[in-house]
């Protein structure tokens, strides 16, 4: 405090001394301003004395308050707590008497409605779009309306009961028909599989679904998954270009189930292998591609190619094109020196190896020892140790001259007694033993397939069915569009795998020549309603991706929804119009 006071008092006095020295200087003396300078200096002295008196008063007051301030600790930030409340609380004054600002607190809405706010009209019905009608229009049968008593009346299934409106969104009820079709397809598939002995009641099975992004396909995928079955879903050509939708359908399945695009299913060998791995499990012990001789052959071929590309005649293991000068003549003299300094940082070229000795003296065990050296080098790089350059050709050349002994752990992998599950921390070229706990899940036997009909598939199936000879069928396929041909190929792949496994093929959403179409029963409708119902945690077994057009507010939205629903590749969502 005293340092601050001295600094504060010194500034007026220094200013005054400068004024006096200026007045006493004969070179700066001006008779006209001499009196003014003295006046200014005197004013500064007076102001200084006044400031000293004021500061003394402040210091005296602070001394009187010093005992009280001493009671405050450093943690209190210099604040002194007061004993008692000097202002008594008025009678009847509680927390409830403190009113919030206008617009806050209950009620949440302002007391005065906004005159510019738009008030939505009440929604009493929801309609799906009938794209197969001519012309397309809002469907009267695939619709749901709220009755006067609060019950829901469906255009196809009649009154649904008083409790449906409480747990199922009205927009979902417009899609009740495809939801019930998916439930019926799963029911029929499991019933036929149990009759034929393929599946047992309560056991896990694998179900194939084509058209998994369509409303009926989404129902079949989700209901089969919720029943404990593995689903291999195929997203048809309408939506397989939407990567996000394929991932979403994959997320609706449970492991080991999955989802692929239509184009993947057209490669029948790959799709067959995927279904087999999903159904029977992908056990590493069952892999038939494990061959130490094949690993060794690939390594020798790659190493000889490496030696040919980067021989030791090069200053470093780089492309020869980097050694060519491609610049201005003035830089030619320094190019070689700069390039040599740069190449000295890189690994050297590979020395030559006699291919005959390579094949004769470098066997699978030596390759396993070489891989162990590479593993040590990798560990050193990760940990930051000084390991130098790894020259594979030089190491192989030395091992050909003097073969090295192979570590026992690389030859024979065994679990340590009383050490828990065996975990293979290193890949063995000689004989890999897979650890416990890495077994994959098995979906169970393939019990059947569900095919959701779309327009491309319907036209392709009818064109092929009309052809009677094999040549005529080939010609019919040739004159189809790419979308129709891919739909037919993918659906045929799904159906063939189901039939080869002894399962059934159920068709929903239309009809296909040679296959049985499934019609939902009242039990299937109730199963769909139960799956649509949202529980207390906001979860339901059956969910849809719906785009709602509120024609109750703007009637023109109904026509616009029909236009959007009939577009080519309309998008992976279901359009519902509310009125």
Image (tube, rainbow, N blue to C red):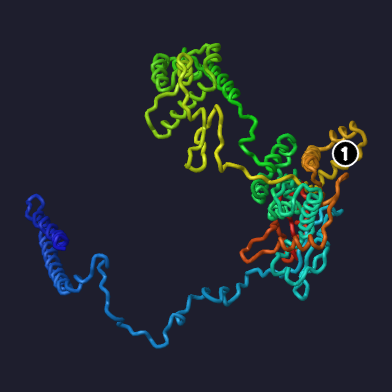
Is 31 in front, or is 186?
186
Q: Quadrant of residue 111?
A: bottom right
In terms of image quadrants, where is residue 496? top right
Whether residue 213 sits left or right of residue 4 in the image: it is right
Report x, y in % for residue 356: 55, 11
x, y percentage for residue 101?
Answer: 48, 75
Q: Residues within 10 Å of mark 1 (few under 14, many from 20)?
A: many
In the rendered image, the vertical position of residue 78 relative to residue 317, given as above or below = below
Q: Which residue is mark 1?
A: 464
Q: Is residue 114 visible?
A: yes
User: Which residue is found at the position 44% from the left and 18% from the top?
Assistant: 348
- Local secondary structure at mark 1: helix
Residue 569 visible within the image: no
Where in the figure is residue 200, as x and y percent of width and height? 74, 51
Residue 50's quadrant in the figure?
A: bottom left
Taking 420 as reference, is 414 above or below it?
A: above
Q: Residue furthest front?
A: 417
């Amino acid at each position: 405090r005293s340092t601050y006071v001295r600094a504060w008092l010194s500034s007026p006095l220094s200013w005054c001394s400068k004024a006096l020295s200026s007045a006493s200087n004969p070179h700066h003396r001006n008779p006209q301003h001499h009196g003014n300078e003295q006046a200014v200096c005197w004013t500064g002295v007076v102001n200084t004395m006044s400031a000293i008196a004021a500061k003394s008063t402040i210091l005296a007051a602070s001394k009187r308050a010093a005992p009280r301030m001493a009671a405050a600790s450093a943690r209190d930030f210099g604040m002194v707590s007061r004993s008692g409340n000097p202002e008594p609380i008025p009678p009847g004054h509680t927390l409830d008497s403190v009113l919030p600002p206008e617009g806050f607190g209950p009620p949440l809405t302002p007391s005065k409605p906004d005159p510019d706010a738009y008030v939505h009209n009440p929604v009493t019905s929801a309609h799906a779009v009938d794209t197969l009608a001519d012309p397309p229009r809002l469907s009267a049968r695939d619709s749901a309306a709220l009755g006067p008593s609060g019950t829901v009346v469906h255009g196809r299934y009649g009154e649904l009961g008083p409790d449906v409106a409480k747990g199922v969104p009205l927009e979902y009820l417009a899609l009740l028909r495809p939801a019930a079709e998916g439930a019926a397809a799963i029911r029929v598939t499991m019933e036929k599989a149990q009759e034929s002995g393929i599946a047992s009641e309560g056991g896990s099975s694998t179900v194939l679904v084509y058209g998994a992004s369509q409303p009926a396909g989404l129902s079949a995928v989700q209901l089969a998954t919720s029943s404990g079955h593995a689903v291999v879903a195929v997203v048809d050509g309408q939506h397989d270009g939407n990567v996000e939708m394929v991932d979403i359908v994959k997320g609706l399945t449970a492991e080991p189930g999955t989802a692929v695009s239509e184009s993947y299913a057209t490669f029948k060998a790959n799709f067959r292998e995927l279904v087999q791995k999903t159904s029977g499990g992908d056990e590493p012990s069952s892999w038939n591609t494990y061959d130490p001789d094949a690993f060794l052959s690939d390594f020798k071929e790659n190493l000889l190619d490496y030696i040919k590309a980067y021989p030791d005649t090069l200053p470093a293991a780089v492309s020869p094109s980097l050694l060519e000068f491609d610049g201005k003549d003035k830089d030619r003299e320094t190019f070689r020196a700069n390039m040599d300094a740069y190449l000295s940082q890189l690994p050297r070229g590979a020395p030559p190896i006699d291919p005959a000795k390579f094949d004769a003296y470098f066997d699978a065990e030596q390759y396993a020892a070489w891989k162990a050296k590479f593993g040590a080098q990798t560990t050193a790089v990760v940990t930051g140790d000084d390991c130098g350059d790894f020259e594979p050709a030089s190491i192989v050349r030395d091992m050909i001259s003097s073969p090295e002994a192979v570590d026992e752990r690389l030859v024979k992998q065994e679990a340590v007694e009383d050490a828990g599950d065996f975990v293979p921390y290193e890949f063995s070229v000689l004989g890999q033993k897979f650890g416990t706990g890495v077994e994959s899940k098995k979906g169970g036997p393939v019990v059947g397939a569900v095919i959701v009909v779309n327009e491309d598939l319907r036209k392709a199936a009818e064109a092929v069915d009309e052809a009677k000879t094999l040549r005529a069928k080939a010609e019919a396929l040739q004159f189809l569009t790419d979308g129709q041909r891919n739909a037919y190929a993918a659906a045929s792949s799904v159906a063939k795998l189901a039939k080869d496994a002894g399962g059934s093929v159920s068709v929903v959403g239309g009809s296909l020549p040679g296959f049985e179409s499934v019609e939902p029963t009242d039990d299937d409708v109730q199963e769909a309603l139960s799956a649509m119902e949202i529980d207390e945690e906001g979860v339901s077994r059956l969910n849809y991706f719906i785009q709602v057009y509120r024609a109750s507010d703007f009637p023109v939205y109904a026509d616009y929804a029909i236009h959007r629903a009939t577009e080519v590749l309309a998008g992976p969502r279901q359009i519902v119009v509310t009125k």
